[in-house]
Amino acid sequence: MNLRTLLTLGRTSNLPTVWSNMLAGAVLGGAVFGPRAYAVLALAGSAFYEGGMFLNDAFDADIDARERPQRPIPSGQVTRGAVYVLGFGLLFAGLLLLAAGSAVGAIRPGFSPFLGGVGTAAAVLAYNRWHKGHAWSPVVMGACRAGLYLTAALAVSGKLSPPVLLGAGALWLYIVGLTHIARFENGSALQRTWVAAFVLSPLLASAPQIIEQRSGLAALCFLALLGWSLRSIGFALRGGKGQIPRAVVTLIAGASLVDALFIALYGPAYGVLAAFGCFLLTLRWQRRIPGT
């Protein structure tokens, strides 16, 4: 097993979207936090994401052998057992990072950050174990990403304020729509297309605040996310070979635009720039490492 195999298993190209998720959750939490706190959150979020991606391949190895034989496990690049160990180990590492961060004062002391991590890890396990053949699985995948917002907010403020719940809910619905589209990436046509419209939820959720605040920066973020989402949905609706996977990877990158939008409403401009940087970095990395 080499580095390329690990990067492919972990869909590591998408990691910057996790970093912007954690940043947005912390900003929406409403408390001041420093580099140490963000480092703990970014590392813990990365561990949860990578652990989930590893377990996805481990649980789906039999299906991948039929539908995606080029994946690392069916192609013999790594054993299924090793991937299970890595996946569960990374989930444990994410929880350990949150516990240690609380213990040394890098993030808020107490059990709330750890409990947020437990909820996120539980959603990751539930999705990977039961997602095939269940129509509700996109709802659980959405909870995995929303859990990053909630965990980050609990880690800096110890509470879930209305902005946190609004942002987490919007991201959750965005991921529900994205995951529904991803269920058809091995086919050529999207079914139940109305579910794909869920990716527009962050726009609907943020619009009243943009109007109330009259924020030019938030309006620019709104337009960027709108254009990117419509472009991505267009790929999925167009149909044909490779179009749905193309829609999926562009929507994954777009998660950082969701973060930028909510940071623009409730946080500093440099946070918006950081989220846009994560968006661009994801697109760059996806050219080298498959995002799905």
Image (cartoon, rainbow, N blue to C red):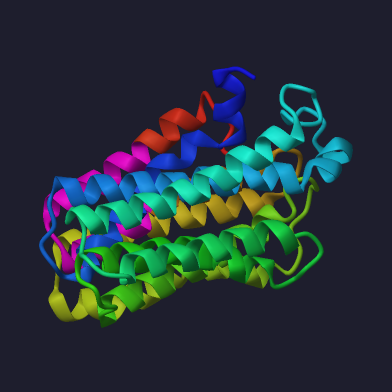
Residue 228: x %, y % from top left: 44, 51
Which residue extends farthest right?
66
Please say whether residue 260 is visible from this viewpoint.
no
Look at the picture and state if 170 lies above or below 10: below
Look at the picture and state if 93 lies above or below 160: above
**Residue drawn at 42 percent across, 29 percent down:** 284
Disc tally is 0
Look at the picture and state if 102 lies above or below 8: below
Residue 204: x %, y % from top left: 39, 76
The residue closer to the viewer here, 56 or 256, is 56
**Residue drawn at 60 percent across, 30 percent down:** 8
| Residues shaded magenta | 256-280
Q: Is residue 291 left or right of residue 228?
A: right
Q: Is residue 184 left or right of residue 119?
A: right
Residue 149 lies in magenta, yes or no? no
**Residue drawn at 33 percent across, 57 percent down:** 99
Residue 214: x %, y % from top left: 14, 73
Q: Is residue 21 left or right of residue 105?
A: right
Residue 189: x %, y % from top left: 78, 53
Please say whether residue 213 is visible from this viewpoint.
yes
Q: Quadrant of the C terminus?
A: top right
Residue 261 lies in magenta, yes or no? yes
The residue closer to the viewer here, 229 or 120, is 120
